[in-house]
Image: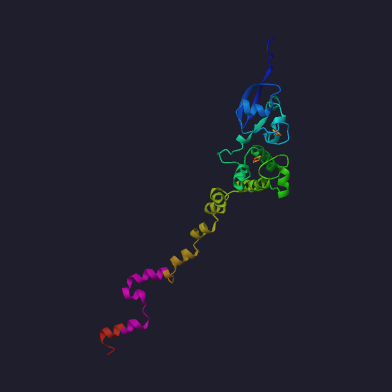
Amino acid sequence: MSPVTEQTHRVALRVNGGHYEIDVPARRLLSDALRADLGLTGTHVGCEHGVCGACTVLVDGRPMRSCLMFAVSAQGLEITTVEGLTEADDRMSPVQQAFQDCHGLQCGFCTPGFLTTITAGLEDNPEPTREEAREMIAGNLCRCTGYQNIVESVLRAAQITRERAAPEPLVEAERSDDSPLVEAERSDDSPLVEAERSDDSPLVEAERSDDSPLAEAERSDDRDPGSRSQPRSSAAPRAADEAESGEGA
Ligand code: FES
Ligand code: FES
């Protein structure tokens, strides 16, 4: 009697931005295909019947139990596993960073499912309350942490997401063509340009005036050195002339 061979099907999967084609039996679970066929073992399998949430991946951005989905059903869909959560510059995602900051894991078995679930949850609700954070993770089981630090991680992840989205004020001001500084330099009507150009500006007026401190300073170069620090009064020259001629004796 010949052994029974299982018919396989070619499936094209898009996972974490990559394109894969695999031959799988129709009953192959997506979780098994990810782990065994693609080697993406970050997706964990706990209960295998949709209770624990450890196998959660994002399918077209929505959290999905990969143990409840056949691989052939994922044809043409965009799948993101925990390995695909890191940012383009290899930084940890806000949720990953928050779990590190808040010690949101112990053994780590449940963590991939929490990370994907919270990533999708914060897309829907970017500023959850503590109660909403609890609801966000209510479908995932953790046997280690007692959940407190995972709730903290949700709130921290929301904060990190906001921080990363906010422009840096100074860098933004320098970079922006619309910034007040760039606008002032560019504008013919800016106060700086106007001051340089105007005949009535205080600077031009000061240069032109005989009574201005600048003109006075230029004129004083003709005097003897002692007169610069102590200007002579109107009576002083006469007294000096008289002393030289002997008229005052
Ligand atoms: S392994 Fe999928 S829900 Fe538990
Ligand atoms: S950290 Fe161990 S099961 Fe959640």
Where does the N terminus fall, quadrant-wise? Answer: top right
Q: Is residue 85 left or right of residue 198?
A: right
Q: Is residue 111 left or right of residue 194?
A: right
Residue 78 quadrant: top right
In this view, the residue in front, 49 or 27, is 49
Which one is nearer the viewer's eye here, 116 or 78?
116
Q: Nearer the viewer, residue 153 or 21?
A: 153
Above or below, 68 relative to 166? above
Ligand 2: image quarter: top right
Q: Residue at x 68, y 47 (%)?
A: 148
Picture layout, residue 176 above or below residue 62: below
Residue 83 can be seen in this image? yes
Q: Residue furthest bottom?
A: 249
Vertical placement of residue 9 versus 218, above or below: above
In reply to whether residue 238 is colored magenta, the answer given is yes
Q: Is residue 10 magenta?
A: no
Residue 234: image x %, image y %? 37, 81
Query: Left or right of 220: which side holds 41?
Result: right
Q: Position of residue 74 (x, y in %)?
A: 69, 27
Q: Could you tell me which quadrant the C terminus lies in?
A: bottom left
Q: Which residues are magenta?
A: 214-239
Residue 37 vs 197, above or below: the answer is above
Q: In which image quadrant can residue 97 be found? A: top right
In which quadrant of the rendered view does residue 220 lie?
A: bottom left
Colour scheme of the picture: rainbow
The prevailing secondary structure element of the residues shown in magenta is helix
Q: Is residue 129 visible?
A: no
Q: Residue at x 35, y 74 (%)?
A: 228
Residue 7 in picture, x, y percent from top left = 69, 17
Residue 246 in percent (x, y) is at: 26, 87
- At a point 26% along the width and 85% down the height, the residue shown is 245
Query: How many numbered discs?
Result: 0
